[in-house]
Amino acid sequence: MRLKVRVHFSKKVRLVDGNPLHAYLTKPPAHGQANQQLLSLLRKKYGPCKIVSGKTNRNKTIETASHL
């Protein structure tokens, strides 16, 4: 399954359902820290996943376990 995710930066980490999902992260985008935090957050809910597109963009497409 592919998910569309919009990343925001905040003081609190949370995931808000919707289309697209809204992920609020605390880590900076430098050196992929925000992407790692995003994947960690999504793995708790969806299992194994990876970023398909948008590694350097706030809008990302994520592929979850059912298609990995």
Image: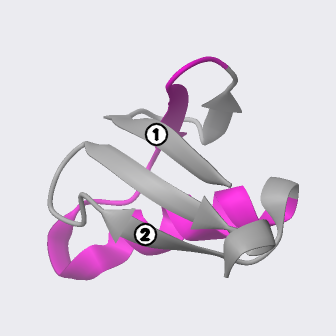
Q: Residue at x 55, y 20 (%)?
A: 19
Image mark for residue 51: 2
| Label 2: element kind | strand
Nearer to the camera, 29 or 46: 46
Task: Find out whether residue 39 is within the magenta segment.
Answer: yes
Count of numbered labels shown in the rendering: 2
Measuring from the top left, give residue 12's x and y in whole percent.
Answer: 58, 36
Image mark for residue 38: none
Measuring from the top left, give residue 34's x and y in whole percent.
Answer: 37, 63
Q: Residue at x 84, y 54 (%)?
A: 45
- Mark 2–mark 1 CB contact (< 8 Å): no
Residue assigned mark 1? 5
Q: Residues within 10 Å of mark 2 (few under 14, many from 20)?
A: some
Q: Residues within 10 Å of mark 1 (few under 14, many from 20)?
A: many
Identity of the amino acid at label 2?
Ile
What residue span does the magenta drawing correspond to? 18-44
Check the image and report above or below for 3 versus 15.
Answer: below
Residue 28 lies left or right of residue 48; in this view the side is: left
As measured in the structure, the alpha-carbon distance from the residue carrying label 2 to the one carrying label 1 is: 10 Å
Q: Work out which quarter of the rendered image holds the N terminus and state it.
A: bottom right
Q: Residue at x 83, y 70 (%)?
A: 47
Identity of the amino acid at label 1?
Val
